[in-house]
């Protein structure tokens, strides 16, 4: 059976909450960078860009939660023993 510590799980929960707060500014910065590099000359290209940005936002959220929850679990385990 997997041995999960309570302090690590609490740290992961706190890390997930931090990820929720960090998602907005992080997603906005990534989106600005992508929009600055995208030409978007016609309507079809802009529609494709919007679909890709939607997927990118989801990927940023997933990565954000994984990283912050992992760091939270690690810190919780280190602090709580």
Image (cartoon, rainbow, N blue to C red):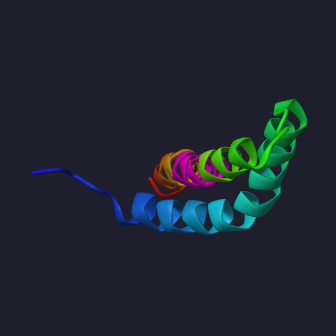
- Residue toward you, 76 or 42: 42
Residue at x 74% of width, y 59% of height: 22
Residue at x 54% of width, y 55% of height: 65
Is the magenta region chiefly helix, strand or loop? helix
Q: Which residues are magenta?
A: 53-64
Residue at x 33% of width, y 58% of height: 5
- Residue toward you, 75 or 59: 59
Whether the magenta-drawn stretch holds residue 59 is answered as yes
Rendering coords of residue 40 (x, y %): 82, 39
Rendering coords of residue 24 (x, y %): 77, 62
Rendering coords of residue 21 (x, y %): 73, 67
Extreme residue toward the right, this view: 36
Rendered image quadrant of residue 33: top right
Side of 41 where 9 appears, left or right: left
Residue at x 90% of width, y 36% of height: 36
Whether the magenta-drawn stretch holds residue 32 is answered as no
Side of 78 where 34 appears, left or right: right
- Residue toward you, 62 or 4: 62
């Amino acid at each position: 059976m997997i041995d999960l510590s309570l302090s690590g799980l609490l740290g992961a929960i706190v890390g997930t909450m931090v990820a929720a707060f960090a998602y907005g500014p992080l997603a906005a910065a990534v989106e600005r960078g992508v929009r600055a590099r995208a030409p978007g000359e016609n309507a079809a290209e802009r529609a494709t860009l919007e679909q890709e940005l939607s997927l990118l936002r989801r990927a940023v959220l997933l990565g954000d939660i994984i990283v912050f929850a992992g760091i939270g679990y690690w810190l919780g385990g280190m602090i709580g023993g």
